[in-house]
Image (tube, rainbow, N blue to C red):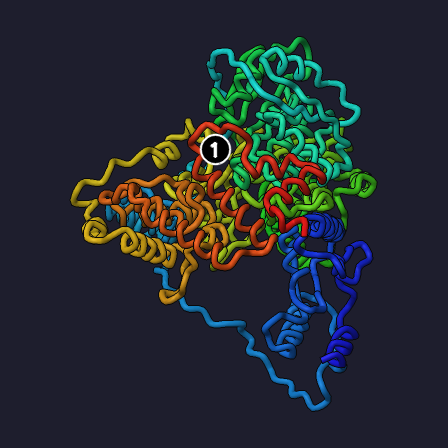
Amino acid sequence: MEPMLAEFAKTVEPMAFADPRIPVVPAMAGADPATPEYWIRQVRETVRFADGVRQLTEHGATRFVEVGPDGVLCAMTRQSGATGTFAPVLRRDRDEVRTAWAALGRIWAVGADVDWAAAIPAHGRQITLPTYAFQRDRYWPEPANTTPAPAPAEAPGESRFWAAVERQDATEIAGTLRLTAPPEALTEVLPALSSWRRQSQQHATVNNWRYRVEWTAVTTPAATLDGTWLLVTETGDDNSTDIEDALRTAGADVLPLTIDATHPDRRQLATQLAAAAADNLRGVVHAAGHQAELALALTLVQALGDAELTTPLWTLTRGAVAIDTTDHITRAEHARLWGFGQAVALEHPQRWGGLIDLPTDGHHDLTQLAAALSGDTEEDQIALRNGRLHARRLVRADQPDPAAPAWAPSRPGTVLVTGGTGALGASVARWLAERGVSHLLLTSRRGAQAPGADELIAELRTLGAHATITHCDVADRNAVSELLTAVPADRPLIGIVHAAGVAQSGPVATTRLTDITKITDGKMLGATHLDQLTEGADLELFVVFSSIAATWGSGGQALYAAGNAYLDALAERRAQHNLAATSVAWGPWADAGMAVSGEAEEFLRRRGLAPLDPSLAIAALAQAIDGGETNLTVADVDWTRFAPAFTSSRPSPLLRELPEATNALAPTDPPTEEEADTGLRARLATLNTPERLAELTEVIRSALVVVLRYAAHEQIDSTRPFQNLGFDSLTAVEFRDLLARQCGTPLPSTIVFDYPTPAALADHLHATLPGADPATDIEPLIGALDTLEAAMADSPPDGLSKARVTVRLQAFLDKWTTDQPAAENTATDRIQAADDDELISLIRDQLGDGARE
């Protein structure tokens, strides 16, 4: 085996465990595993190892190879939170050759360089792999057509009339209308009539996609705070004194913590949070500084998870939102935290408190701050103005004025479209050309080398517009300045459409600080540069493309939501200064932007989001521009699907004034006796406790097979957490609905979070469904204890085994007595609070004489 390992090492590029930053857990030769000192040292070395892994993964390491004698280090690395590819070369009780080749293939599949000529013997045989990786069995009906509902049915004659208009069949129309004039008299009016018809149908559809945000006053009595509240501020920020005073006045014991916002230390912050948690920590308040650094917000959320805390985190901004026309956005950069926070609320509902915006100028009455933080309002998106709380709401946007004049350029000039060669930008360019823009300046990172660039220029020329495509990184201020300076003097800049950006897909827990720049710069810096460098220019258009992720949040897109929330705030701030500004927060586009088709489209539709037809999306954009709207959300949402999934793990006050959402979330009437009779209850009534549990487990397994699309014969481990089975918010709701029908009783949508495994859920259903025997027979438990005592008497364990049994029994007793007043700290509390000497003493007490031998 050794020669093979040597050749293996030559073929693999240096991996994580060859990195000097990763310490190796020592073998500790000569140490006695039966002593507490051994285990304390082992724990400390393991922690040191985990820290090294974390540092390395922060620098981008994603491939890990362990050269035996087992996969222990790979397991430890995974447990440390690292993500990537793990390839142990040797595994205990597994064929050595097969395991080594499997490791080699695994790292090659994720991009590692492998010298196959050296790895494969000369007589090795190469075969051609199939072009399709695997064949799938589909056990789910095809989704129904969920295109927008058609308009009310027309009379047959009316349908024929409009069909003739679409064909521009003058003869049939003249006959239908019984005109005495010759059909030729209709030649001129038919194109206009056909165009009016199409636009009318488009507007009817698009009007159903329009939403906006408004603010409503919340009345609540004064509240008090108790316990310790950690107030996190940024280094150099001295603008949080009023917040600290308000917390203390409300009764909180305030613990200040100042953090370097630009370079926060996640590990150190987790340690500080854990220490604060030992002092009756009731909440964490992040008072954003002037720049409202996303790095600190991201690290705070991650550190709370590292410390295993569910203490709610509240983020306080200043001047990030405007509640009405008399209010003003003064710090658009703070709006980033609103987009970020809404995404965190979906990913970590137990860890997130909410968002509160404070005024920036004048005397601040913060007496209602305590009411917001205490949760008495049940609101999590709040603005505090003039001593009153205002809550954020999503509502239907007003219908556009059909008589509003269509925008057209007032003079010959240039409109700049960033991301202009992409699918969204190209669609906008065509519309601008149709509206009469004479020159289009289209930018992208690849410029004229972008696929389809020449064809786009030719198409725009046929529409009457001259187009120039050039390379420009809009995150680079100098590049943007040079771009604007090069605009021809005879065709001055008259408009900007900022459609560039980088999408994101990844959970907050694994997001790196370096991702902030990569994901947000194109959106945020690009918009900032365009805004600042055109100050004083007479722009007729300043349009930014935002996202629904900024309107109501989107799991896995926290940084993307942050960047788009900034765009919304920037547009509103420009409008407050009477500058051109339109921000549209888009849902997914079909065949463009978030290109969705096939399974991706089905995924969105099942969650209640239908991709927007690009031509209709452009019609919505035209409505917003023609109507002079500043902030608009455009999305095709099926609220009966979207709202239950969106609120499955956390209520959303944001949706409280949207009738479609409230109707979808309204409690359903309990099933009638006939509806509740699925046969399950009758079966359960004839079974004893073990049989009931087995039956309920099978019912749960069958429901899982349906909602997760497993093969019918696939086995599911009843102790495996639902989250690890592939659950998300939608499947949680679908699973709840299916199981509720089977059980004949309403169930909460949070059931997979409240009872995290199939076994735990089966226990719950057994206890709540009719017919469960009262748990009064403790004889089996007494018998088990007698058996344990006899086994210990016949074969006394060594010191280490005795300690393990003791800890396990103590954990059982802690759970057994959780509903009883605690006379003293539990063993778990004592272990967590102990220093080294106390920990050694505690283990010696548990080991008894075995620790002293």
Q: Residue furthest left?
A: 674
Taking the image as shown, residue 793 lies to the left or right of residue 320, namely left
The amino acid on which the numbered mark 1 sits, given as a three-letter code, is: Tyr
Taking the image as shown, residue 821 lies to the left or right of residue 556, namely left
What is the secondary structure assignment of the residue under circle 1?
Answer: strand
**In the image, residue 8 above or below residue 740:** below
User: Residue drawn 50% across and 55% down?
Assistant: 600
Q: Which residue is mark 1?
A: 211
Measured as percent of width and height from the top left, residue 645 is found at: 43, 42
Report if residue 512 is visible in the image: yes
User: Residue drawn 60% across and 35% down?
Assistant: 830
Say few, some or many: other residues with alpha carbon within 10 Å of mark 1 (under 14 / 14 to 19 / 20 or more).
many
Quadrant in which residue 479 is drawn: top right
User: Residue drawn 47% across and 40% down?
Assistant: 813
Depth order, front residue of 736/46: 46
Taking the image as shown, residue 697 lies to the left or right of residue 625, namely left
**In the image, residue 669 above or below residue 160:** above
Depth order, front residue of 823/218: 823
Measured as percent of width and height from the top left, residue 254 is found at: 65, 19
**In the image, residue 748 above or below residue 362:** below
Q: Tell me the quadrant of the picture where the N terminus can be found.
A: bottom right
